[in-house]
Amino acid sequence: MALMSPTRPAHSRGNPDRPSRRIGFSQRLGRLDVKVSPYLYISPFFLLFAVVGLFPLGYTAVVSVYEWNLLGGQGDFVGMQNYVDVLQQPTFWKSVGNTFSIFLLSSVPQVIMAITIAALLDQNLRAATFWRMGVLVPFIVAPVAISMIFGRLFADQYGFINELIGLVGLEPIAWHGDRLASHVAIATMVNYRWTGYNTLIFLAAMQAVPRDLYEAAVIDGAGRVRQFFSVTVPQIRATIIFVVITSTVGGMQIFDEVRMYDAGGLGGPNRDWMTTVVYLYDVAWGNQKNFGRAAAVAWLLFLLIVMIGMVNFLVTQRISTAGPKQSKVSRKHTKRLLAEARAAGAPGGVRMPPTPPGAPAGSGIPSPPPTPPARPSTGSPTTNSGEDLR
Amino acid sequence: MSSVAVTAQTAGPGAARAAAKRRRRVPLGGSTRRAGRLTYFLLGAVLLISIFPLYYTLLLGSSDSVSIAQNPIPQWLPDSSLFAQFQTVIASDSINFWKALWNSTLIGVFSSLSVVFFSTLAGYSFAKLNFRGRGPLLVFVIATMAVPVQLGIIPLYILMSEIGWYGKVQAVIVPGLVTAFGVFWMTQYLSEALPYELIEAARVDGASMFRTFWSVAMPAALPAAAMLGLFQFVQQWTNYFWPSIILTSQNPTLPLVVQSLRDNYFVDYSLVMGGVFLVTLPLLVMFFFVGRQLVAGIMAGAVKG
């Protein structure tokens, strides 16, 4: 290359423009490639999200202020009338209550069960993969299938669950008649499908917990239960928050399980187990075929989810800052104690950092302080290290 | 270029896997507790609970609706009358079973491939390429995961009807072509598993940006991409909400078959349960072969997320 380059000008003199222009063009193309490619590669996601995510969400607001029917299409502008109508419907409020009830019944036991099973799996097991696969089996069954199956298990007459209950000596429960009982049944389906999945997520988090923490706990005399509550649970706190948040978003949108729970699929004759998403479906495609009103329901549900998300965020924020902050304070405290102890030891000149021989006396070497706490800014190495640690 | 690809295959994911193995081996050493009998007993109970509903489906499918209506456990073992139910379901005019199986497969395969390709492309860009606005855009992608996009369902329905896609499978495929989860997942994986040196080597060799992606990043992303594809496949296969709105029972997916079974044969529990098991069977078979990878994928994603 170095030998070639001097000859180049001679060549290009005979053919003044062409080679340089060609290089320029391919270079420019290459530079364009470098500049545009990153955006080109991420653009499919953003384009698709704009069309099937963002636009529909925004346009829902537009639909919600019009009279708009499934068959008739767009009608007159009605302002907030659809919202007023929805808020005046007792069924809407009932569905919101049902959603909350089912959500609580499904999320709380689910997280507790998943952590417990994960703790069982987080041991030196034989055939570990087999057990892990076992808990994941329900995840591959479609929710609609689960709902059909559990609809039979929870049958009011001669159902399997009622038979079990009868063995204990209890009266059979009207799983398709009583409001709370139906919520328990539907929450059971949600738990059935998702507990194993969340178990694996917790298990992964537990396996990331440093094992020496357990060793330390054992040395301190902690039993298994104490280890679980004092080491495992605090260590996987972030994962618990993650699972709670994802199950909140999912729990607010329960649909499949309700649709297949009985013959009608709209939450029973009294709408006792109709969730808000099923209500939305019913308004838009079921009995009313009223898109405007359904869009209003969608927006109200959206606001509800955002509100719960914010509450979630605030609560978890407090939980997550409470723990580490405490430990940070205590760590700082111990560091300070350590620094003080070092300062106390400094006069003996044992921990003195090596100073260059020709260094001016005032810069690095502190005069032996008369009092142990060498806090004042004498430029002593001990306080410096204390500051670094902070 | 092929040599570059080979290097990527050996140094990219292989190195990451070896590192993960090393990491796992050190802390787990010998300090883990050995599981006792109680553990196995409890896990056995959990396993029983997760399997039992499927087994119960087989039992009901082998029985007849009269004994089901009078007996919580009509029989203890499934028998050959189950196959008669399968045949009835497949032959039924109102069910369209083969069409549903074909549609579900089509949607699952197409959507998985597409999610893998576009997510890897975007993940590669976010993880390894420098461009203005990279940080905020990635934050935006992650934020969209928390947005319940299902609530935009009414305009989406209007949109699909306007362009004449009502009742057609592309109405289900297109919204699932690329997901925020996939992009995030591949970004996480590639930022660890793909060394910059490989990209630079390919660029020095004169590969274009896309060629670099295809020959270096894609092979390195393969393990995570396989898991992502699997996950997407299961999601699409079990998805009901959107297909139930945009598709019809003439052109259904398998979850819609469950709905047709209920609508047409609700009191014939035996037939319905036989059909429900038939619908579940394909994924069960698949799970038998790739369940291990699915477990590994969920656990790997959990640590990063």
Image (cartoon, coloured by chain):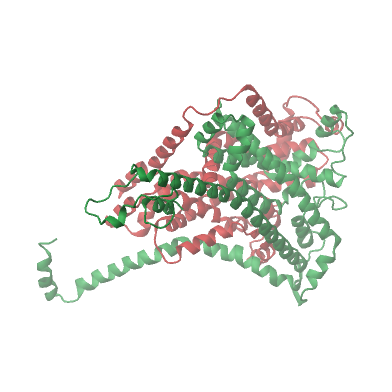
Chain colours: A green, B red
Residue A80 at x, y percent in the picture: 77, 74
Name the side, left or right, on which A118 lies relative to A36.
right
Quadrant containing the N terminus of chain A is: bottom left
Tag count: 0
Tell me what residue is drawn at x 60 percent, y 34 percent: A227
Where residue A134 sits in the image (x, y, percent)? 62, 32
Q: Which residue is found at the position 58% from the left and 58% from the top?
A: B174
In front of the other: A324 or B224: A324
Q: Find residue A358 and report its horizontal and vertical position in percent.
A: 21, 54
Question: Is A276 positioned to the left or the right of B109 in the image?
Answer: right
**Left or right side of B192 for A349:** left
Q: In this view of the protein, which residue sits in the foreground, B68 or A112?
A: A112
Image quadrant in which you'd find residue A278: bottom right
Residue B94 visible in the displayed image: no
User: Where A115 falls versus B216 (above or below)?
Assistant: above
Image-based side of A355 in relation to A384, left or right: left
Residue A197 at what x, y percent from top left? 62, 41
Which residue occupies the foreground of this view, B184 or B214?
Answer: B184
The residue shown at (83%, 32%) is B68
